[in-house]
Image (tube, rainbow, N blue to C red):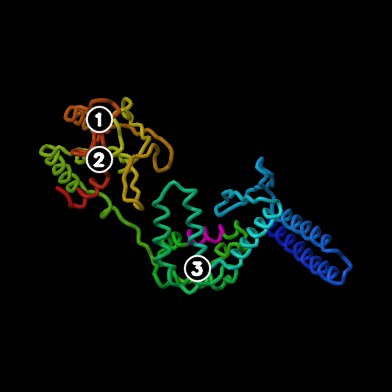
Amino acid sequence: MARDRHLRTQVTISINIMTVMDEVLKILIEQGIVSADSLRQAENMRLAQKVALLHENKISQLPNGQWKTYTPSKNGKRKELRARTKEDLLNKILAFYEETDSHIENIIFKDLFEEWLEYKNTITESPNTIKRHRQHYNKYIRGNPLEAKGVKKIDFLSIQALCNNIVKEHNLTRKEWTNVKTILKGMFEYAVEKGYIADNPIHKVKILVKYRQENRKNGKTETYNTFEYKMLMDWLDENISRNSHPGFFAIKINFFLGLRVGELVALKWSDIEGYNLHIVREEFRDQEHCKTYVVPHTKTNRDRYVPIIPEALAIFHKMYKKYNPRQEDDYIFCMAGGKDNEPTSELFAAEVCKGEKY
């Protein structure tokens, strides 16, 4: 990036020199020393030289006589430019880069966030990540006076103050601050890559205020004791005997499998390979569009095998007899009353565990 900034500086200097030379030529023609045709030829030459310094892509003439080229647009995508004459095309190219330089000089903090988030959306497969970034920005940063300030004019101390004030005013834990820092770090890293600023200030930020203490959860609140476990198993067995929904089986069997809920509800009978369970997919909840669907990968994008202990195997046998799947590719926990071969939503399990259903 240092090399790119050096090249940009050199280009600016060269263009300034050319501008001075153009002014000299105008004076010479006014005094009758140089002809108008010579001036026009010189202007066209200067235009071509300016464009050559800024523009690396090929300029070509089409069979119909028009001229075309491609310029980089937002997020690095190419944009086609066309014109009837080469001179017109060169002027369009120059205008594009002048507009780009103006954008670099004038972009403000909140617009940088929107631009970065738009770019981020093109390189992530998770719309939930984009939604969380916007939620965190709105909660912790939106409304700060820094939003309206030009990115190039924001000094390090202003960023340092912003970060410390966020932690202090919202009483954040270290983990909560990391979520906010991810946004700021990404924004300014993007700004560096785009040439808006020279360095990412977030790398040097120090949090000098105290984080809120986060007490670790203990076994008393995070695990079931023997009495609670028996009560839950009895309750699940009772619902299994009087209810056709396979979600109750799902909750019970996961005590013996320990899967992520999204992986559990997306299991198919074909995933059972002897005494092992092949985990290859999961149910995904798109919070941005309020949709739920199965994706052909796990959260970590790695498949794995989980041993099926006798207790879990017994439950699978009982389910197979009860539901009698038509083919091995059927979902094990098929949605009762839903679409044909539709998996049980993990929301069902959450509602049952919270006592919001049945």
Taking the spot 63% from the left edge, 58% from the top edge, the residue there is: 96
Is 180 placed left or right of 321 in the picture? Answer: right
**Residue at the disc numbered 1:** 313
Residues at marks 3 and 2, CA–CA distance in whole angstroms = 45 Å
Q: Residue at x 60, y 56 (%)?
A: 193
Please say whether residue 185 is one of the residues in the magenta stretch.
yes
Q: Position of residue 56 (x, y in %)?
A: 69, 50
**Residue 207 disc label:** 3
**In the drawing, what numbered circle is on residue 344?**
2
Between circles 3 and 2, the one closer to the viewer is 2
Amino acid type of disc 2? Answer: Thr
Which amino acid is tagged 3? Ile
* Whole-percent x, y for residue 289 in the image: 34, 51
What is the span of residues highlighted in magenta in the rendered image? 181-190
Q: Is residue 213 left or right of residue 191?
A: left
Element under disc 1: helix
Asked if marks 3 and 2 touch (Cβ < 8 Å), the reply is no
Residue at (57, 60) in percent of width and height? 191
Secondary structure character of the magenta stretch overall: helix
Q: Is residue 198 visible?
A: no
Q: Are marks 3 and 1 in contact (CB under 8 Å)?
A: no
Which residue lies most toward the left here?
242
Q: Picture quarter containing residue 157? A: bottom right
